[in-house]
Image (cartoon, rainbow, N blue to C red):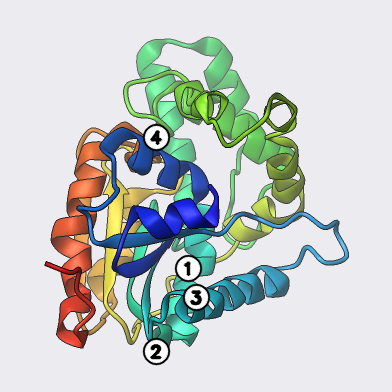
Amino acid sequence: MQQERVSNLIRNSAVMMPQRSLEMLVRSFGLAGSSGLRLSILEESNNGFPTLTFERMRADVQEMISWVMKEFGKKKIFLVGHSWGSYLGIQTALHHPEFLHAYVGVSQLTNGPESERRGWSATLAAAQRDGNEEAIRALKSLEPYFAPGRPSSLQDIYSQRKWLDHYGGVMAFRKSNSAESDLSILSPDYTSADISHIWDGNEFTEEAFLAKVLATDLSGIKRIECPVVIFAGRFDTNASSEVAAEWFDKMSAPKKEFVWFENSAHLPMTEEPGKFFEVLLRVVRPIAEPAGDTPPR
């Protein structure tokens, strides 16, 4: 989305979000003018394995935050991280809370290995209820999946995700997440050439990061010095919302709120976009008001 369009869309506290989430909100609800939010986009970089590191990605987030604050004259912003972005987001909130009105974790990654084990178990149980012998064999062949101290391979993760997706762990009540992926085709911000390669970078990044991220346990984070809001899909077994809720109950922050999306799994911004937008405005935006960062009346 062109920067001048973003600047004209909204007028208040800057929010960094994934692009497709942003597009869904802007295009579906006409965010312009009335929301009091200014949204900026951070897309994953893909410059090759030598520069594609956790350190580089974390630095990218910090550099983008600095740019957003300078560009829009803000002392603080909101940071929204989804899925893999929540891994970067929560660490940014931990180490640089002074930049943030609040951190919003969507489908928050916390204890990766435990999340994987529960996702595998839930998917196997669904396959057994369904009498799906193919899925049962495939899932049982992965045992012991993410055994303590023994992270599973990327290939095993892909095998597990095939059936997790089939049984609604990514998009609730659906047998695949293709509906979410297909949104990219409708975007006027991509050319036909862009769309034909839209997943190339995603696959490259997964190869570099996915297994390592899912082997990471962030549940040792007990205190974050900025407000924290978590958006969780009730049926999310891709990044277990149960595990995230257990972590949230034990962590502390100046202000915290956990919001359940009862008809969503891993993609609440796509599955329940109206509620997603409403909670941003009702719960998240007012956090900036004590600092005088409010939309014009």
* Amino acid found under the numbered disc labelled 4: Ala
Residue under the point 23% across and 79% down: 293
Query: Which residue occupies the foreground of this view, 280 or 271?
Result: 280
Q: Secondary structure at mark 1?
A: helix
Rounded to the nearest angstrom, the CA distance separating label 1 from label 3 is 20 Å
First in residue order: circle 3 vs circle 2: 3
Say which of marks 3 and 2 sits in front.
3
Q: Are marks 2 and 4 in contact (CB under 8 Å)?
A: no
First in residue order: circle 4 vs circle 3: 3
Say which of marks 2 and 4 sits in front.
2
**x, y percent for residue 90:** 45, 71
Say which of marks 4 and 3 sits in front.
3
Residue under the point 21% across and 60% down: 258
Rounded to the nearest angstrom, the CA distance separating label 1 from label 4 is 27 Å
**x, y percent for residue 252:** 26, 81
- The circle drawn on residue 71 is 3
Using a 10 Å C-alpha cutoff, classify the residue at mark 3 as few (fewer than 14 neighbours), some (14 to 19) or many (20 or more).
few
- The circle drawn on residue 122 is 4
* Amino acid found under the numbered disc labelled 3: Glu
> Quick check: 274 above or below 128?
below
Find disc 2 in the rendering and name its residue: 98
First in residue order: circle 1 vs circle 3: 3
Which of the 4 quarters of the picture holds residue 150? Answer: bottom right
First in residue order: circle 2 vs circle 4: 2
Q: Secondary structure at mark 2?
A: helix
Quarter of the picture holding the C terminus: bottom left
Rounded to the nearest angstrom, the CA distance separating label 2 from label 4 is 39 Å
Q: Secondary structure at mark 4?
A: helix
Q: Secondary structure at mark 3?
A: helix
- The circle drawn on residue 89 is 1
